[in-house]
Image: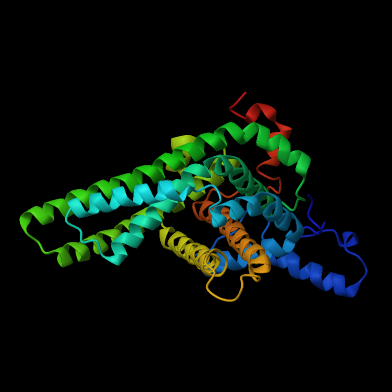
Amino acid sequence: MEASSGISPRNPNKHDVDDDPYQNVHTESLDHSIRSDHQFHSTSALEILRETVRILRYNLIGFMGIAAFLVCPVSTVLLSNVLVDQSIVKRLTIRLLLVAKSSGLPLRPFIKQSCQKFSEMVISSTMCFPLYITLSLLSKAAIVYSVDCTYSRKKFDVSKFYVIVTKIWRRLVSTYLWVCMVITGCLTLFLVLLVAVSSLFSIIGFGSDLIVYLAMIAGLVFSVIFANAIIICNIAIVISVLEDVSGPLALLRSSVLIRGQTQVGLLIFLGSTIGMAFVEGLFEHRVKTLSYGDGSSRVWEGPLLVLMYSFVVLIDSMMSAVFYFSCRFNSMEALNGECQSVLEAMTLSPGSIGFE
């Protein structure tokens, strides 16, 4: 899987460009659009999105190959819920509803739907965990490597990527396990606090309507906190690929690196979340639920929505990598005057890796 274009972002050698004037124009446009030396600074999510699109155009075949072979299989399983046992989801939903009722929350349709969605998410994440820790994690590493190669004016080389993955895989898995623990801890803490506060207000004598409003406000506050945690976790995965840190150190490094850029990260997270939720809703309505016709359109709508979801996931991972380079340059840690890939340096100096 190699990039289709051998054109470097900044080509100082005029003899490397063909004599075709149209190709020269295309080459110059790409050369000026991609920053080299890993130096990209942005203060807005829109600029990061534009930079991501430029990188995607520069190495289109490479990124599309990653999406086809690594992202699409996970997206297919995730959207179809083929591994999810609905009987387990139903039992977990009933338990959550009993907990909500005992804590004083009225069993309104909103509460019931929230419990059902949360149950589906928990069961789906549990059953898809082997895919997340293999294909999904490998796709993130490949995307980060491709972005790094683009900034380094290199091609995506499968053999080099394989060598790099064998060296960083242990720390990558370690970081991902810590990310899972952080996300699980945040959700568990929120549920415990929500039940405790709702029970306290119910004992004091607050009405059920007021408890629901307070729970919604608490949910909004938690959403902001949880979004920040997700941003830190995403950047920690990028850091564990590009830097020789892993686990809690990668999370700490991520929280320090994005300081002052939290608003940009929140906008990136919001856009990606809306895109994924939109495609998931379409898949639920158009493929899973037979709401019109004889269902023959599922044959082409299902694969199309899987491709759309995979593309959103690809863009999200690319934007996380670009956001990392932006924060890194903003914190005065960019590489000055070097064009060598951060990851390819590992292949030249095997002793630089902390793992045997």
Counting from the top left corner in percent of width and height, residue 74 is at: 60, 50
Q: Is residue 229 visible?
A: no
> Quarter of the image holding residue 184?
top left
Task: Give the residue drawn at x 60%, y 48%.
Answer: 140
Q: Is residue 99 visible?
A: yes
Q: Camera-side residue: 164 or 261?
A: 164
Q: Camera-side residue: 207 or 183?
A: 207
In this view, 213 is above or below 174: below
* Residue lying farthest to the top in this orientation: 356
* Residue lying farthest to the right in this orientation: 19
Counting from the top left corner in percent of width and height, residue 305 is at: 61, 65
Counting from the top left corner in percent of width and height, residue 337 is at: 67, 50
In this view, 175 is above or below 286: above
* Residue lying farthest to the left in this orientation: 204
The C terminus, quarter of image = top right
Q: Camera-side residue: 74 or 89?
A: 89
In this view, 249 is above or below 94: above
Q: Camera-side residue: 226 or 321?
A: 226
In this view, 248 is above or below 296: above
Counting from the top left corner in percent of width and height, residue 86 is at: 45, 51
Task: Give the residue drawn at x 63%, y 48%.
Answer: 139
* Residue lying farthest to the front in this orientation: 294
Task: Give the residue drawn at x 68%, y 62%.
Answer: 56
